């Protein structure tokens, strides 16, 4: 992937909305890279036949930010929920996946597993969960059902919601 300006490092993330901002920015880079295919069914996997690296929202962050080693050609084990068990990375990846599929409560539960990341104590989480549902943000974003533009737009809406609620 081409070098890009990184607005913040993963180590600086303190909230779910900051994590989602990084992942959205990285997903945009992946959509633009001809060697990467966005597939919400794969966290990070290398297709031996095509030479294409497949990523989902969480995988985009892993690939672009270098949080974990990229899969090597010929690898038979993609990085996914079964193979990413790093205590520092796994909760973030699960939280991103939960946000993508519309499960805010589960995302918050996963992010709380990380000692330095979580909602602002002043946030009204219960109210945020009610508003999340009322706004229809509980729908799952999948490929190929969503185009790249629709995916980014929907994720941006979720980011703005999380930022507004300081989650």
Image (cartoon, grey):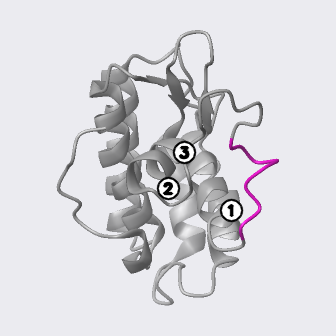
In this view, the residue farthest toward the right is 82
Residue sitting nearer the eye, 53 or 131: 53
Q: Residue at x 77, y 30 (%)?
A: 76
- The residue at which mark 3 appears reads as 70
Residue sitting nearer the eye, 73 or 10: 73
Numbered tag placed on residue 20 in the rendering? none
In this view, the residue farthest toward the top is 49
Q: Which residues are magenta?
A: 79-86
- In this image, 41 relative to 52: left or right? right
Q: Is residue 124 magenta?
A: no
Q: Residue at x 76, y 48 (%)?
A: 81
Assess whether mark 1 and mark 2 are in contact (beta carbons under 8 angstroms). Answer: no
In this view, the residue farthest toward the left is 5
Badge 1 marks a residue whose secondary structure is helix
* Circle nearer the viewer, 3 or 2: 3
Q: Which image quadrant: the N terminus?
A: top left
> Which of the marked residues, 2 or 1, is nearer the chain's N terminus?
1
Is residue 156 shown above or below 127? above
Task: State the separation of the CA atoms marked 2 and 1.
Answer: 27 Å
Assess whether mark 2 and mark 3 are in contact (beta carbons under 8 angstroms). Answer: no
Badge 2 marks a residue whose secondary structure is helix
Return the x and y of residue 108 as percentages of the image width and height.
62, 67
Q: Residues within 10 Å of mark 1 (few under 14, many from 20)?
A: many
Task: State the separation of the CA atoms marked 3 and 2.
Answer: 37 Å
Q: Residue at x 59, y 43 (%)?
A: 102
Is residue 137 shown above or below 151? below
Return the x and y of residue 30 as percentages of the image width and height.
36, 33
Q: Is residue 83 magenta?
A: yes
Is residue 11 shown above or below 142? below
- In this image, 157 relative to 79: left or right? left
- The residue at which mark 2 appears reads as 131
- The residue at which mark 1 appears reads as 90
């Amino acid at each position: 992937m081409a070098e890009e300006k990184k607005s913040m490092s993963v180590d600086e993330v303190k909230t779910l909305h900051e994590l989602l901002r990084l992942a959205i920015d990285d997903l945009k880079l992946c959509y633009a890279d001809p060697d990467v295919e966005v597939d919400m069914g794969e966290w990070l996997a290398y297709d031996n036949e095509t030479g294409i690296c497949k990523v989902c929202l969480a995988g985009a962050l892993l690939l672009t930010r270098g949080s974990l080693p990229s899969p090597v050609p010929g690898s038979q084990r993609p990085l996914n929920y079964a193979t990413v068990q790093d205590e520092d990375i796994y909760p973030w990846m699960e939280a991103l996946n939960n946000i993508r599929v519309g499960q805010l409560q589960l995302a918050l539960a996963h992010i709380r597993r990380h000692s330095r990341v979580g909602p602002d104590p002043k946030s009204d989480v219960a109210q945020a969960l009610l508003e999340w549902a009322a706004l229809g943000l509980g729908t799952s974003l999948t490929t190929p059902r969503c185009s790249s533009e629709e995916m980014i737009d929907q994720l941006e809406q979720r980011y703005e919601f999380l930022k507004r609620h300081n989650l």
